[in-house]
Image (spheres, grey):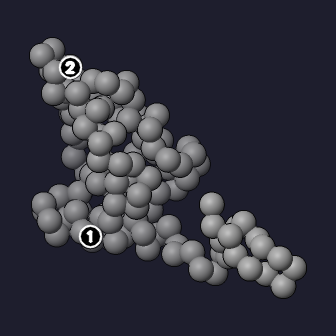
Amino acid sequence: MALHRTEHGFDDKMSRKNRVPLADCVAKAAEAALAARHFVSAIDVLVGIGWLDAPAVERWRRGQIDCLEEVVRANLPRISEAMRLFRSWATARGLFASQTAYVGRTPRRHTLRACFAGS
């Protein structure tokens, strides 16, 4: 929690004018992943904006987490908004979506579920 001094004491909420818009965060994360690997996924964006950590993704790939959405540090409406912004960003750049099947890093090699709302 961040505390900010106000004329009446301290305020525990970050000023809205100091926040970077979600669209900018999504675009920056997507651009970085695209530049690094020549493709970008919803997972890349969520890791890039700080809502999902890489160790959680690895646990998911090892089958220790059923659905990746369970460990995203944002609520469903915010995840949906980020995925909508990601789609808009991709469309504006002429990128196309392709279905990706994530396979677990386990002996059974089962299909993993990401379950992102709106993706």
Question: Measuring 36% from the left and 27% from the top, which residue is drawn there?
Answer: 65
Q: Say which of 87 and 10 sits in front.
A: 10
Identify the image quadrant of residue 104: top left
Instruction: Give the image location of residue 106, x and y in percent.
Output: 16, 21
Identify the image quadrant of residue 87: bottom left
Question: Measuring 29% from the left and 42% from the top, which residue is drawn there?
Answer: 55
Split into 4 quadrants, where in the image is the C terminus?
Answer: top left
Instruction: Give the image location of residue 60, x and y in percent.
Output: 30, 32
Q: Is residue 69 left or right of residue 90?
A: right
Q: Is residue 49 left or right of residue 40?
A: right
Q: Residue furthest bottom?
A: 7
Of the image marks 1 and 2, the number of the one nearer the N terminus: 1
Q: Which residue is under mark 1?
A: 31
- Image disc number at residue 82: none
Amino acid type indicated by mark 1? Glu
Q: Residue furthest top?
A: 108
Q: Crowdedness of circle 1 by 10 Å Cα count: few (<14), some, many (20+)?
A: some
Q: Is residue 105 left or right of residue 90?
A: left
Q: Is residue 83 visible?
A: no
Which structural element holds mark 1? helix
Q: Is residue 78 visible?
A: yes
Question: Measuring 78% from the left and 73% from the top, which residue is drawn there?
Answer: 10
Looking at the image, is 105 positioned above or below residue 18? above
Instruction: Give the image location of residue 14, x and y in percent.
Output: 66, 71
Q: Which residue is under mark 2?
A: 110
Looking at the image, is 22 positioned above or below residue 41? below
Which structural element holds mark 2? loop
**How many discs appear?**
2
Split into 4 quadrants, where in the image is the N terminus?
Answer: bottom right
Amino acid type indicated by mark 2? His
